Amino acid sequence: MPYSDPRLDRLNTPAVVVDLDIARRNIERFQAYADQHGLKVRPHIKTHKLPAIAEMQLAAGAVGITCQKVSEAEAMVAASPAIRDVLITYNILGSEKLDHLAALATRVSLAVVADSADVVDGLSARFAGEPAPLKVFVECNTGANRCGVSTPEAAAELAARIAAAPGLALGGLMTYPPARGEARVQAFMSEAKALIESKGIAVEAVTSGGSPSMMTAADAPVATEYRPGTYVYNDRSLVAFGTCSLEDCALTVVATVVSVPAENRAIIDAGSKALTSDLLGLSGYGLVLGREDIAIDQLSEEHGRLVSEGPIGLKVGDRLRIVPNHACVVTNLVDAVHVIGEGRSQPEAWPVVARGRIV
Amino acid sequence: MPYSDPRLDRLNTPAVVVDLDIARRNIERFQAYADQHGLKVRPHIKTHKLPAIAEMQLAAGAVGITCQKVSEAEAMVAASPAIRDVLITYNILGSEKLDHLAALATRVSLAVVADSADVVDGLSARFAGEPAPLKVFVECNTGANRCGVSTPEAAAELAARIAAAPGLALGGLMTYPPARGEARVQAFMSEAKALIESKGIAVEAVTSGGSPSMMTAADAPVATEYRPGTYVYNDRSLVAFGTCSLEDCALTVVATVVSVPAENRAIIDAGSKALTSDLLGLSGYGLVLGREDIAIDQLSEEHGRLVSEGPIGLKVGDRLRIVPNHACVVTNLVDAVHVIGEGRSQPEAWPVVARGRIV
């Protein structure tokens, strides 16, 4: 990947740049893997929050999209008629969100998840009078220790509750697995599926996800569907994990050196408002393309501090391209990304339609 | 501070709440200190990004505002006729930003900073033909090791360059000091000021800043002006530093428990898209009001994980109020904050006018 690109020379910095050629290659790469293994793809749009990229993913073969919040799903559906099938991988609670969910269910094929009777009962109370049942997946904890029921038995119990609940239908099982967690996914989900089926309830789908382990997703053959998010852009965390190479990183932050106050220190105009403070276990706040000897060791909101062992060799006005630690959170900071590729001679600003949708 | 507040019971969560009664008290507290010590106050608006709160600060006695980027200043000036005096504490580079700066200079009293000849020369080239000179402060590194010239001699040299540059006028000296850095500010700035004055150039203002040390700002009497930002809201980092108490925290994040998957673990609907990953040296991602036994030990974008030594004692649907580690970065994530106080019976949504202005 070039650390200097004439197409970016006139961008007002800091700017978040997305190379659509690379994004398309990333989309096609995973779709081909999934097709080969009979896995459906349902990308998580949290990474790009862009209707046009969701459309690229659907055109490549994705069966629908994944969103994390109701407002995020609403923004995507409102912006693209191609989005007809949405899974919201979140426990939805509270009358305001449930009303929005019910309205959305009249527009697209919609499913959500639940990991407790409280959530199931709330969904049922709201959807009991609706014309069509809401599909609900049981969220299972296969080791990430975030949400999810903790045993196959608990999954089966909750599945039965969903199947019996007015206004709801069992969608299947869902998990967000730990990295390299295929064996645990296979064991947990197979057992839960068998327990549910032994009650005479069908388990139509088992959905797993996560970009880090996506190229070994087929090692948990119980899964029928996979929900990668970050894979479309990739980032420094996925390079470190070995999922992709630097050349596969579609999102970069273009920054300008605004100060070189010491021989081994330079300051850029991108801080935590452009790169975020997400470390994801890494050291430093991003990778300066072409200058892996430099560490971004400190961020304040509008300043990034670059340090090097020897002379840093930068001057005021120099432009740098940075691969951030975590692409998804960068997207969420900016009103627009600047897309290049697919024949564009100049970057084109695309509004980040689903940015900041947290409810 | 109440961890439960009936005014917040109907907010769709997660929601960022600002208590204007507390914010006003914080504003008045520092203004009184500054007045007592003959310090001018020029608050940094990065913390709130709200014209109405800038107006509260100006009405309390502030001489103007501080912004970090040109676009941030433009948003604030466009939104409030009360904002007539703006210092942008940033090295401004590049023709697009300089054009915006020149346009802004025709509307308000404007000043910027510089820490290199490159920046000074760029400013001079753009402002040479303008009707009025642009005020430029020399940024000095008094120990924070971010931007700034590193010696009083270098400050004096750059000040002379500014004073001689077509289109520019010397504003004075500026620093963002390290915490408890009054002695270094006093020593550096006094020496730089004397060196500049020995050349027959007046140093009209010396501006320092930073909320952590604001209540000892007068221990660097060379400073004529102070630029606190976070003080208006305060946050967990300033409580930890001893600058304020929890009762002085005006900004909180209201979240709902969406899952209690284990006896000592609960998940809330606020993750890094609401609380941010900023740690500022602290452990955990915020303080749960009324439950200091709980740690927020992990964030993903839309989930916050709460853990406790003993039983966590929370149930799905419970609402919590969280004091974030760093208030400023939270403000930057949301399109609106929900203000309470000053007699409101319900929260009122205020658009965060200058959110996301990074260029």
Image: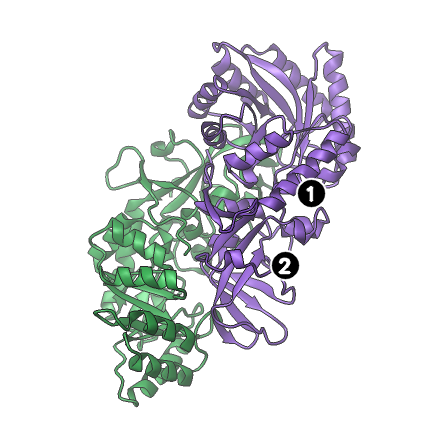
Chain colours: A green, B purple
Q: Label for residue B283? A: 2
Nearer to me, B350 or A50? B350
Element under disc 2: loop
Nearer to me, A313 or A61? A61
Q: Is residue B357 left or right of residue B290?
A: left
Residue A217 visible? The answer is: no
Q: Is residue B327 left or right of residue A202?
A: right
User: Callout 2: residue from which chain?
Assistant: B
- Please state the horizontal and vertical placement of residue A102, each as a whole percent of the image: 29, 63
Q: Label for residue B98? A: none
User: Callout 1: residue from which chain?
Assistant: B
Q: CA distance from mark 2 to mark 1?
A: 18 Å
Element under disc 1: loop
The mark lying in front, picked from 2 and 1, is: 1
Residue B32 location, quadrant:
top right
Image label count: 2
Q: Amino acid at mark 1?
A: Pro
Quadrant including the C terminus of chain A: bottom left
Nearer to me, B144 or B231? B231
Residue B185 location, quadrant:
top right
Q: Amino acid at mark 2?
A: Ser
Q: For mark 1, does the 10 Å Cα neighbourhood hold few (<14), some (14 to 19), or many (20 or more) residues?
A: many
Residue located 75% across and 40% down the image: B180
- Decide: is B315 above or below B168: below
Q: Which residue is mark 1?
A: B212
Q: For mark 2, does the 10 Å Cα neighbourhood hold few (<14), some (14 to 19), or many (20 or more) residues?
A: few
- Decide: is A330 above or below B293: above
Residue B197 location, quadrant:
top right
Q: Earlier in the sequence, mark 2 or mark 1?
A: 1
Residue A331 visible? The answer is: yes
Q: Are marks 2 and 1 on the same chain?
A: yes
Residue located 70% across and 48% down the image: B244
